[in-house]
Image: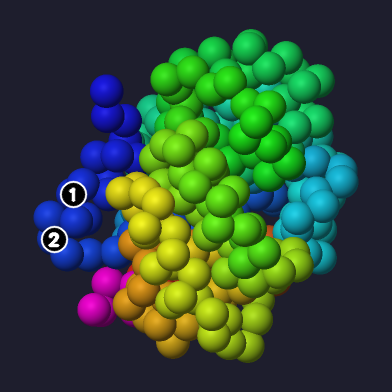
Amino acid sequence: MQNRIDRCFQALRAKNEKAFIAYICAGDPDFPRTVDLALVLEKAGTDILELGIPFSDPLADGVVNQLAAQRALEAGATVSGVLECVRQIRGRSQIPIVLYTYMNPIFQFGFDRFHREASEAGVDGLLILDLPPEEDQPGEAPLHIRLIAPTTPPERVQKICARAAGFIYYVSREGVTGAQSSVASSLGERVAQIRQCTELPIAVGFGISTAEQAKEVARIADGVVVGSAIVQRINDNAGSNDLPARVTDFVAPLVAATKAQ
């Protein structure tokens, strides 16, 4: 049975378009503004929303996203609060939502309970950064999005793709999240190798921060993920009454570049 992620990529494929995927940290600067930001991101052309669950030790995240998680936690963000935030978004939007998280918050919440309540809240996919595929036993919903890194050997790529759903998230470079000055030169070759192992869409993230980079990645992949650059704009304008408008102004050119193929 298709969910919103599958339907989104199917619709984009019919239009020969690529997906723009935006990441923000839930609860940064607070949950009401997270809902507002989700809605304006969709209005600006975002196809899929990645919501980070704040965690005190996000090993795959660079300093920008680490600080966002810290701000959210200091403001009182919890897993239950994130799920309620999803419910608030879902009451006004059908944008596909992927939760970006680590095992610790899910383990503390309860693995089965988390999956059940996330599905009921309207979450479409989970991106669990530190859960090896061999240890995962996903159900039908939410879909478990799989990560592949530049260092992933070919035989493991095949195993990961065999257990994947929704789309493949290709980490474009080694290291943590954060804006980079250029797109990795190996991107085209690596995406082509992954395509030999799966028919799922391939989205590329980690380091994309400009319209030029988004356009370059969109020529190769099926989706472009922008996170830290958006989170930085949220941080820079958190005290502004026109925060949603300022985020929109930053995201709109990235969306346009992703679609301009």
Q: Residues within 10 Å of mark 1 (few under 14, many from 20)?
A: few
Can you say whether 138 is above or below 56 in the image? above
Residue shown at the point (25%, 79%) measured from the top left? 260
Q: Secondary structure at mark 2?
A: loop
Q: Residues within 10 Å of mark 2 (few under 14, many from 20)?
A: few
Query: Which secondary structure type mostly characterizes the magenta part of the structure?
Result: helix
Looking at the picture, which amino acid does disc 2 mark? Lys
Residue 104 can be seen in this image: yes
Looking at the picture, which amino acid does disc 1 mark? Ala
Q: Secondary structure at mark 1?
A: helix
Q: Which residue is mark 1?
A: 11
**Position in image of residue 53 (x %, y %):** 68, 39
- Relative placement, left or right, of 146 versus 79 is left
**Position in image of residue 5 (x %, y %):** 34, 40
Residue 253 can be seen in this image: no
Gap between marks 1 and 2 measured at Cα: 7 Å
Residue 157 magenta-highlighted: no
Q: Are marks 1 and 2 in contact (CB under 8 Å)?
A: yes
Using the image, tell me which numbered label, if any, was put on residue 112: none
Q: Which colouring convention does the figure follow? A: rainbow
**Position in image of residue 107 (x %, y %):** 77, 22
Residue 152 falls in image quadrant: bottom right
Residue shown at the point (21%, 47%) measured from the top left? 10
Q: Nearer the viewer, residue 3 or 133?
A: 133
Magenta-tinted stretch: 257-261
Residue shown at the point (49%, 18%) measured from the top left? 139
- Relative placement, left or right, of 137 versus 12 is right
**Position in image of residue 218 (x %, y %):** 36, 73
Using the image, tell me which numbered label, if any, was put on residue 15: 2
